[in-house]
Amino acid sequence: MSDPWKECMDYCLEVTKEAGKMIRDALQRDISIMQKSSPVDLVTETDQKVEELIISSIRKKYPTHSFIGEESVAAGAASVLTENPTWIIDPIDGTTNFVHRFPFVCVSIGFTVNKEIEFGIVYSCIEEKMYTARRGKGAFCNGVPIKVSGQEDISKSLVLTETGFKKDPEHFRTMMANMESILTIPVHGIRSPGSAAVNMCLVACGAADAYYHMGIHCWDMAGGAAIVREAGGVIMDVSGGPFDLMSRRLITASSRAIADCIAKKIQPFPCGRDDAE
Ligand code: IPD
């Protein structure tokens, strides 16, 4: 059967390598930091330049395709997923890590057609790990196949989540209560690497057994979702229902048993949708 999206993925790989080099080069210089929605929602000139590089390169080759990019949306572009082939881009996932030179910083790109993710690329560019996955064709890190741990017992699992400033005190309390609820199962531990896409790749390669998060965006999830799925992982909504790329929340795990257990243990808090009017 022909594979119409292979050429797009090959091209994406080249652009991603270039973007990763741009980020590594920027780490050698002073980083000037700007604020977005809050004092802990950061952006740098590099986020903007890397997104410009990615979108302009891809648009030149595929002028009819659509784009959802973190920095373009921050600048007012629409964030609506349609049936059209769509590139969902986070130029630097882990901007706070980048600012601190904490080494989990990646370029994340997911490609959808008819709202289905066809492939994902996550380049953890300081570690120089290139994670790739195409629908039905497996997941890889630097060309070597990867798979989830297969762990089914939550009490033997390492769980990832992210803690962030929450403006609403009620949301903050729920986030902390959720961590307590998971830690007291008990699990082996909770970790917060600081990049949603890297977190998903850590589950995909078996270094962690689960990751849950509420309040992230489609550009944080699209690339990693392809990778964790193709590595044999489960990805679903925090309610236990099907994963929804625009819902701003997810649970991903090495097995359905662990994902279901997390869904039962955590309380959702409202975080809106990426495609809300
Ligand atoms: C952030 C990272 C982080 C998560 C934040 C995201 P960004 O993405 O994925 O892990 O806790 O919610 O915004 O802003 O660095 O692309």
Image: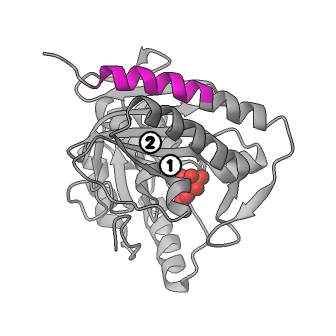
Relative horizontal placement of residue 147, taking residue 168 as reference (left or right): left
Q: Is mark 1 within 8 Å of ligand 1?
A: yes
Query: In the figure, 12 relative to 242: above or below?
Result: above
Quadrant including the C terminus: bottom left
Q: Which residue is mark 1?
A: 196
Scheme of image coloration: one colour
> Can you name the residue that lies furthest to the left here?
1
Q: Which mark is drawn over residue 200?
A: 2
Relative horizontal placement of residue 90, taking residue 49 as reference (left or right): left
Tell which quarter ligand 1 is in: bottom right
- Mark 1 residue element: helix
Q: Give coordinates of residue 96: x percent, y percent.
A: 68, 53
Query: In the figure, 221 relative to 269: above or below?
Result: above
Q: Give coordinates of residue 129: x percent, y percent.
A: 56, 25
Is the Cβ of the residue at disc 2 closer than 8 Å to that at disc 1?
yes
Query: In the figure, 162 relative to 210: above or below?
Result: below
Kind of residue at disc 2: Met
Residue drawn at x 64%, y 67% as measured from the top left:
36
Q: Is mark 2 within 8 Å of ligand 1?
A: no
Q: Specify start and end residues of the magenta stretch as a single range.
A: 5-18
Whether residue 146 is visible, yes or no, is no
Q: CA distance from mark 2 to mark 1?
A: 6 Å
- Mark 2 residue element: helix
Q: Give coordinates of residue 62: x percent, y percent.
A: 38, 33
